[in-house]
Amino acid sequence: MSNFLGTKNDFIAIYATINFIGSNNNLNIYTLVDYYKNILIYKTDEIIENADGNHYFLVEGKVKEHRDIKNQKQTILEECDFELVDRLDKITGDYYGCIGDKVELQDVLATYRRKEDIEWKITGEFSILTPESEYRMIIAKDNYTFILPYDSVKKLSYKKSERYIIYAKVVGYSVEKGKRATFLYPTVIQKRGELREGRRWWGGRWL
């Protein structure tokens, strides 16, 4: 079931498929559908290539208004930019939860870290805490890929014998090497066997 995204005049970013649905008054009308089946509408005098429902796009735009048409909630966009990511059938994995959801990752081993050499490609229209780290840490668990800002988790080790419990909040989504990825902001990081009751991990240290 579709829900509204953002509020009027907000700039939002989503990953979505796009379909051309017709023209009216010399404007092409496109419908966008994100991972959670939310419906967005965009009208433009331009032609969007690969708007066939089979390709995945990063869409950045401004919320013009919300409409409820036949019990279907639609977010109307304007001033949009589109970046083609890949064919939909080449994108794997799932996003975890919604913006603001709390996440508890048990028995975690960080898989790798790397410096990001391009601009961040993260959605998060309702996010306040967004990763601003120069490095990122990738954690693969089940069918999910999680990304944490590395500056916040410097004490994580890569020894196979050291595993962690991570408490975090969902702050956005991305696509990493063909996989859907969920951005997290950590609030507590604990080594298994060294649980620190009543303390929080924040800004690179225990409080």
Image: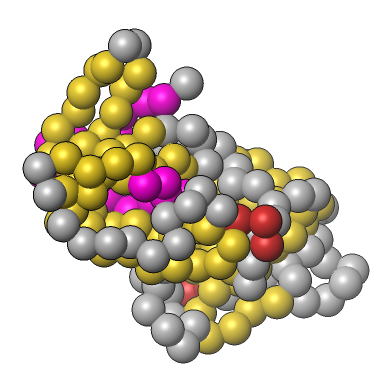
Residue beneath the point at 59% across and 83% down: 114
Q: Is residue 118 above or below residue 47?
A: below
Q: Position of residue 94 (x, y in %)?
A: 65, 47
Q: Was residue 19 drawn as part of the magenta stretch in this picture? A: yes
**Residue at left 51%, top 58%?**
56
Q: Is residue 132 visible?
A: yes
The residue segment tinted magenta is: 2-20
Residue 182 seen = no
Q: Position of residue 199 (x, y in %)?
A: 54, 47
**Residue 164 quadrant:** bottom right
Q: Looking at the image, which residue is at 42% across and 33% down?
A: 38
Residue 7 appears in which quarter of the rendering? top left
Q: Position of residue 32 (x, y in %)?
A: 38, 43
- The residue nearer to you, when weighing 90 against 164, is 90
Which residue is depicted at the point 10% across and 43% down? 25
Q: Using the image as rendered, state which of residue 9 and residue 31 is in the foreground.
A: 31
Left or right relative to 45: residue 133: right
Rendering colour mode: secondary structure
* 157 sits left or right of 60 in the view: right
Q: Position of residue 27 (x, y in %)?
A: 16, 48
